[in-house]
Amino acid sequence: MSSINVNKLEKITEELLTIIGEDPGREGLIKTPNRVARAWDYFISGYSLTPEEVVGDAIFNMLCDEIIVVKDIDFFSLCEHHLLPFKGVVHVGYLPDQKCIGLSKIPRIVDIFARRLQVQERMTEQIANAVQRVLEPQGVAVMVEAEHLCMQMRGVEKKASFMVTSAVRGVFKENQKTREEFLAIVSKRRS
């Protein structure tokens, strides 16, 4: 977990409850400051990790010249503008250059960047850059599809809207057919 000051966050939460007119001493709220502090410790745990730490020695030498895709990776994050959640799925594809990564490591890389205060555009770029850096493939493609509560429950209040971002590196940027193959794979639904 992260290294936030849990006691201080508990006090801030208790103060927030008082400011909004609640009684932090009432039965339903007595443990809320502690629960909020522990939740935030988890929500921002990505600050204390690096992709290199998470991947460790899970990179394997392998001859493979086909696109590898991990799709529909669930994530939850917090918008840095309103501290409200956004959630969705991430699709990550790469074309190996003699190295492959352990299957669970790509979702772990996603979690590192999702568990920070974020904007979707930057998170997409960070995931692509991290996979490119730790794996050194011929190319990386990342697509993120997400719903943002800051837009759905306040402001324009568009409940059915979602945002799609992408980042491409290497052959996915240089070769349209490779990029199209990635897009075809991520758009195909399981039967």
Image (spheres, rainbow, N blue to C red):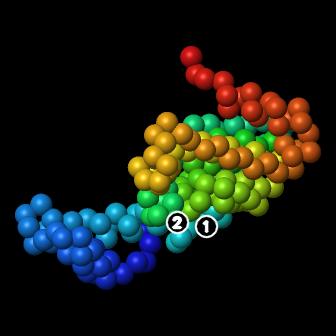
Q: Residue 24's quadrant in the figure?
A: bottom left
The residue pinned by badge 2 equals 80
Please state which of residues 165 and 190 is positioned toward the viewer in this rendering: 165
User: Earlier along the polypeptide chain: callout 2 or callout 1?
Assistant: 1
Whether residue 189 is visible to the viewer of this picture, yes or no, is yes
**Considering the numbered disc 2 on the image, is that residue within a helix, a strand or a loop?**
loop
Percent position of residue 115, x then y: 50, 61
Q: Residue 189 carries which label?
A: none
Question: Which amino acid type is marked by label 1?
Answer: Thr
Question: Which amino acid type is marked by label 2?
Answer: Glu
**Considering the numbered disc 1 on the image, is that residue within a helix, a strand or a loop?**
loop
| 188 horizontally vs 156: left or right | right
Percent position of residue 166, x then y: 72, 46
The residue pinned by badge 1 equals 50
Furthest toward the top, the residue is 191
Residue at point 74%, 27% (across, down): 184
Percent position of residue 19, x then y: 24, 76
Percent position of residue 76, x then y: 48, 51
Of marks 2 and 1, the one in the foreground: 2
Furthest toward the front, the residue is 156
- The Cα–Cα distance between marks 2 and 1, rounded to whole angstroms, is 20 Å
What crowding class fits label 2: few (fewer than 14 Cα within 10 Å), some (14-19), or many (20 or more)?
Answer: few
Q: Is residue 187 above or below residue 75?
A: above
Quadrant of the image for the C terminus? top right
Furthest toward the left, the residue is 27
Residue at point 49%, 49% (across, down): 156
